[in-house]
Amino acid sequence: MKKAFLRLSVMLLLFPLLAGCTGMNIQNYKATTPELDLFAYFTGETTAWGIFQDRSGNVRRAFTVAIKGDVKDNTLTLVEDFQYSDGETEQRIWVITRHKEGHYTGVAKGVVGEAEGQVQGNALNWKYDFDLQVGKKTYRVHFDDWMFLQTGGVLINRAYVSKWGINVGEVTLFFQRP
């Protein structure tokens, strides 16, 4: 009993240290190229291909997204039309506001409050809570969403999805402009 308590105590003490070591920092990408201009990249038409993987790495869903972006002043409106491999369709409309020094906020159906984003170099990091509909149930999850612009105009997106700080899945997308 004493050994089990000691092991549990050590694990509980180490967990915050290990969790603190896993985060990425947007500042690490400040000097990376090509530089991402979020509004310029998403103005007009863009296509994306993606998958959702559960925490074991199994692909649970594949999809394509047709995106139309329109900029007015400091606002980017993205109309995303999803086509899932099982035939389901969905539309999500993002309204993204540009603030100073590479900071952005965004709202969309399902996003709780506002998404907060920041661009540095070729990278964008979004953080937000989202009410995810799965069948007839809704789960509130957290997205730590990273995008990286590559040479040739391909944008790679990796989103880490968690609930109560525990990884529940990952979304991977590749964006391409015509």
Image (cartoon, rainbow, N blue to C red):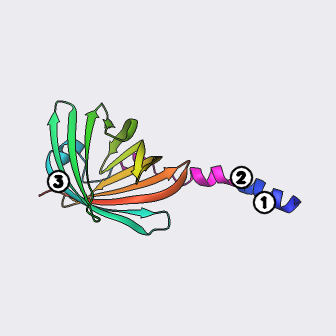
Q: Is residue 28 visible?
A: no
Q: Which residue is mark 2?
A: 12
> N-terminal of the two: label 1 or label 2?
1
What separation in Å lies between label 1 and label 2 (alpha carbons)?
A: 9 Å
* Residue at the spot 26% in from the left edge and 36% down from the top edge: 95
User: Are discs 1 and 2 less than 8 Å apart at CB?
Assistant: no
Q: Earlier in the sequence, mark 3 or mark 2?
A: 2
The quarter of the rendered structure image containing the N terminus is bottom right
Query: Label 3, label 2: how many angstroms apart (C-alpha)?
Result: 45 Å
**Mark closer to the chain start, 1 or 3:** 1
**How would you classify the magenta stretch by its main secondary structure?**
helix
Task: Name the residue carrying label 1.
Answer: 7
Residue segment shown in magenta: 12-30
Mark 2 element type = helix
Q: Amino acid at mark 2?
A: Leu
Q: Position of residue 77 (x, y in %)?
A: 21, 38
Does residue 176 sit above or below 133 in this rendering? below
Please tell me in which quadrant of the rendered image residue 117 appears: top left
Looking at the image, residue 71 sits to the left or right of residue 124; the answer is left
Q: Give the residue displayed 21% in from the left and 38% down from the top.
A: 76
For the residues marked 1 and 3, what is the alpha-carbon distance in whole angstroms?
A: 51 Å
What label sits on residue 46 in the rendered view? 3
* Front one among 62 and 135: 135
Circle 3 Cα neighbour tier, 10 Å, few/some/many (<14 / 14–19 / ≥20): some
167 or 74: which is nearer to us? Answer: 167
Q: Is residue 17 magenta?
A: yes
> In this view of the protein, which residue sits in the foreground, 144 or 101?
144
Q: Is residue 118 above or below residue 19?
A: above
Q: Is residue 1 left or right of residue 87?
A: right
Amino acid type, residue under disc 1 in the picture: Arg
User: Can residue 43 be found in the magenta stretch?
Assistant: no
With respect to residue 4, does 70 lie above or below?
A: above
